Image (cartoon, coloured by chain):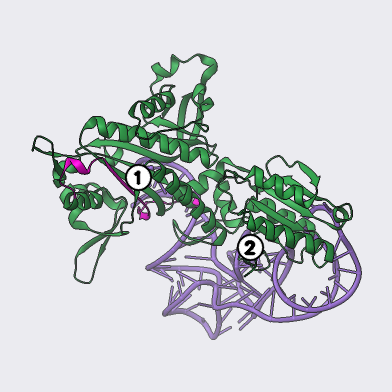
Chain colours: A green, B purple
Amino acid sequence: MTGAPKNMRLSRYFLPVLKENPAEAQIVSHRLMLRAGLIRQASAGIYSWLPLGFKVLRRLEEIVHEEQQRAGHMPMLMPTIQSAELWKESGRYEDYGQEMLRITDRHKRDMLYGPTNEELITDIFRNAVNSYKDLPLTLYHIQWKFRDEIRPRFGVMRGREFLMKDGYNFDLTMEDALHAYNRHMVTYLRTYERMGLKAIPMRADGGPIGGDYTHEFLVLAETGESEVFYDSAVTDLTLGDRDIDFDDVDQCRAIMEEFTTPYARTDETHDEALFGAIPEERRRTARGIEVGQIFYFGTKYSEPMGATVVTENAERVPVHMGSHGIGVSRLVGALIEANHDEKGIIWPEGVAPFPVGIVNLKQGDAGTDDVCESLYGQLIKAGLDPLYDDRNERAGSKFATMDLIGCPWRITVGPRGIKNGVVEVTSRRTGESEEMSAEAAIAKLTTLLADR
RNA sequence: CGGGGCGUAGCGCAGCCUGGUAGCGCGGCGGUUUUGGGAACCGUAGGUCGUAGGUUCGAAUCCUAUCGCCCCGACCA
C-alpha cells in the first residue's frame, strides 16, 4: 500500500491566494481567478495556469472529451504552429488580417500560430480519404489557439492565447452534414449541462469561418459581451438524462428543433418583428457570454482545397463539412461569471477542482487531526478529490480560503463537534450546514457527487 | 489603431507638483498571547523606484527616448 497522495493538503498545495484585488482585473471572473490562485498573467492576454486553475481546465477538457466520444467523434491533436501554405491555398491567409500571428522561421518560411484548424484538417483528410465508404467522419482536438487581439481584456474571457475544442465533420451530402450539425448541437447541450451551465443556442452570424447554418451557445451573465434577446421558454428546456442515440437522425433533429424553435438571438441577428411576436411576459433581454459555436459550411474548404471522395457512382465530389468549437479556457471565466458571490467562486459540482474541502479547526488536536485524516483518506478512495486544509491557521482564514476557491461542499471538523461525534457539512451555494457523523458525511457526499 | 491612465517590496498604495538618497497597509519570517468567519502585540527580512540616456553637486521626483500594463472606442471565440 502506498497510502493517500499528500498533494491535496493545503500545507503542500501551491495555492497563492490574494486578499486584495489586483489592480489590472476589472471583471469579477478575472479578479477571482487571480485572487483564488487559478492563473497569473504572463503578458497581455496570455496566462499561466496554476495548479488549481489547471485542474479546472483539465476537468472541462475531460467532460468535453467524454461527450464528444460518446457521440462517436474521434480525438486527435494538431499542432499550434502551422505553415502558411495551406492558408494561402484556402485564401484565408490574406483574409484573416492582423489577428493572425504570423511568424517567420529561420529558413524565412511563412508560419503562423493557428487561430483555427480548418485548413490543416482538410489537408489531412484529403491525403487520407478518397472513398464515400470512409464517411461520415468527425475529428476533433483540444488545443491552444492564438488570436492577436488588438485589445485583450477580461482575463481568460478574451485572451490572445486560448484553449479550444474544435471539431470537423466530413460528410457525403448536405443531409448527412446537417445530421452532424444536429448531433453536435446535442453534444454541446449535454456538455454545458454537465458543467452546470445554462447555455442557450442562438442563431448566429457566419463570421470569418462562413456558413449559413450556425448557432452560437451563450451563457447568461451580466458581464456578457453580447446583448441577447430570447423567449423565456428556452431557458426552461433541459436535456436531463434522456437516452440519446447519436446515430438517430430523427432524434437529433427533434432535439435541435426543440432547443432552437423558441426565439433566441444575439444583437447580430436580432429581428424586432419576430421578437415582438413573443408574448410580452416571455420576452427577455439580457447579456450573454459566447462559449461555443457550430457551423455547417458545405464545400467552402473542400472545394478549393480538393477534399473529395468518390461516390457509389464513381463520381468525385467535394465533401460537406462543418466545424464546431467550444472555448474551453474561456469557459472557466464564464463559469465564474455565472457562479460566484461576494466571498468568491461557487463551482458547480460537475466542474469543481476540489468538490469537497475539509477544514480542521484545531490543527494539532489529536481528535480533529484523526477525523480529518480519516475523511481525507476515505474521500480520496471514493474518488472525490478532497482538499484538506491542514494548515496551522485560524478558522476564519480557512473558511475564507475555502469560500474563495469555491469548494461546493465543506466538511468542518472542530473539537466541539468531535466531542459529540459529529462533523459539519456545509453547502457553499446555500450556506446551509448540517451536523452528522463522519461516516454519514462521506455517504452523503458520495451520493451527491456520484454522477459527477 | 485613436483617446486616456499607470509602472515605487509578493499584493494594494503614498511620496513626484515644490530634487537632498524611499514609506504605509496587507502578506512573509521568528516569538508571545490567542483559536468556529481573513486575530493582537513585539521583533525581523524584503525595493535595480520599468529600462536607457540627459540636466544637476545631488534624480523615484525635472527632460528625452523606449518597453510594459490597464481603461474607453473600433474589433472579436
Residue at 74%, 48% in the rendered image: A441
Q: Which mark is residue A262?
A: none
Q: Secondary structure at mark 2?
A: loop
Q: Position of residue A344 (x, y in %)?
A: 65, 49
Q: Is residue A384 above or below residue A279?
A: below
Residue A157 visible in the displayed image: no
Dot 1 or dot 2, earlier in sequence: 2
- What is the quadrant of residue A266 in the picture? top left
Specify few, some or many for label 1: CA neighbours under 10 Å numbering under 14, 14-19, or 20 or more: many
Q: Which residue is mark 2?
A: A8
Residue at 38%, 40% in the rendered image: A71
Magenta segment boundaries in residue numbering: A129-155
Spatial CA distance of label 1 from label 2 is 34 Å
Horizontal side of A413 relative to A187 (left or right) equals right
Q: Position of residue B28 (x, y in %)?
A: 70, 72
Q: Which residue is mark 1?
A: A73
Figure label count: 2
